Amino acid sequence: MAEASIQAAALPPDSVAPPPDIAAHPPPLVARLTGITKRYGTNTVLDGVDLDIRQGEIVALVGPSGTGKTTLLRVLAGLESASGGRAEVSPSSTVMFQEPRLIQALRVWKNVLLDDAHKPGALELARAALQDVGLQDKLDSWPVSLSGGQAQRVAVARALYRRPELMLLDEPFSALDAFTRRSMQSLVLGLWAKYQFGIVIVTHDLDEALILADRIVILSRGQICHETRVALARERDVTSPEFNILKRELLEQFSLSMN
C-alpha cells in the first residue's frame, strides 16, 4: 500500500457535511483522517480509520487497551507515520501526554516557552500563559517544587502558549487524584470555552469522556465501531439521570467492542 500522506495545512470549512446538531455554517475542520491504516510488521493496529475534527469540538477516544487509541492520536500529532491513508491536520496543533514532561533544569516560565525563551517579550508571554492556568505566581519556580496537578497545569500553559487550533491529550489526568483530575477537567473546559480550539482526548474513563466530550468514539480492533454525540449542557452533573443513561449505553457498546 502507498505511503500515507500527512498534510499540515488549513482544511476547507465545507469539505464534509455538518452533523445534524451543528448549524448551517459549521466550524472549519482542524483535522481529517481518511482510511488511516497502521501496521507493525504483521500486526494491524489501525485499519481504515476515518475521522473528522472541527474547530471547537471535543472528541474523546475510548476503547479497550490495545485498540489503537494512542496510535491514532500520535498519527494526528505527526509522531507516527501511517502505513496507508491520508491525514490532514492543522499545523497549529499541540500534544499533552500522561506525564507533564517538564525539564527539571529550567524554571517554570522557560518550560512554557522552551526554545522561544530568548525571544523578545518572552517572560510576559509565559506570564500570560501561566495566568490562564492559575500559576502566574510560579513563574520563577523550579519544577521539583510543583505538585502533580501544578506540573500538569504548566504542561497546559506550554500548549496554550502556541495558540493551537487542535489540542491532543493522551490520558493527561490519569495519574492525578480524583479531586485534582476534576479540577483539571474544569480548567480545560474553561480554556476551551475561551479559545475554542478542537480537542481530541484519549481516556479509559467513561465519566471523563462524558464530562468533556461533544462526541465519543469507541475503537475496537483498530476500527471505529461506535460513535455517540453527547447533547448534555455543560457543566455536566455526573449524578443526573441523563448522564447515567448515556453512561449505561456507552458501557453496553464498550462491552460489545470487546467481543
Image (cartoon, rainbow, N blue to C red):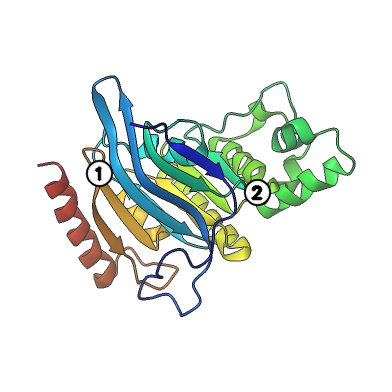
Q: Residue furthest front?
A: 2
CA neighbours of label 1 inside 10 A, class few (<14), some (14 to 19), many (20+): many
Element on which disc 2 rests? helix
Residue bearing mark 1? 223
Q: Does residue 47 appear anywhere in the picture?
A: yes
Bin the neighbour count of mark 2 within 10 Å (Cα to Cα): few under 14, some 14-19, many 20 and up. Answer: many
Query: In percent of the image, x 84 and y 47: which residue is there?
Result: 124
Q: Position of residue 87 (x, y in %)?
A: 45, 44
**Residue at figure coordinates x 55%, y 55% from the top left:** 187
Identity of the amino acid at label 2? Leu
Q: Residue at x 58, y 43 (%)?
A: 94
Height in image: 254 above or below 38? Answer: below
Q: Which residue is mark 2?
A: 160
Image quadrant holding the C terminus, namely top left
Q: Work out which quarter of the rendered image holds the N terminus and state it.
A: top left
Q: Quadrant of residue 234?
A: bottom left
Compared across the picture, whether 110 is left or right of 134 comes to right
The mark nearer the N terminus, 1 or 2, is 2
Q: Between marks 1 and 2, how big is the CA–CA gap? A: 31 Å
Q: Amino acid at mark 1?
A: Gln
At mark 1, the secondary structure is strand
Residue 106's place in the image compared with 256, above or below, is above
Identify the mark at residue 9; answer none if there is no mark.
Answer: none
Closer to the camera: disc 1 or disc 2? 1
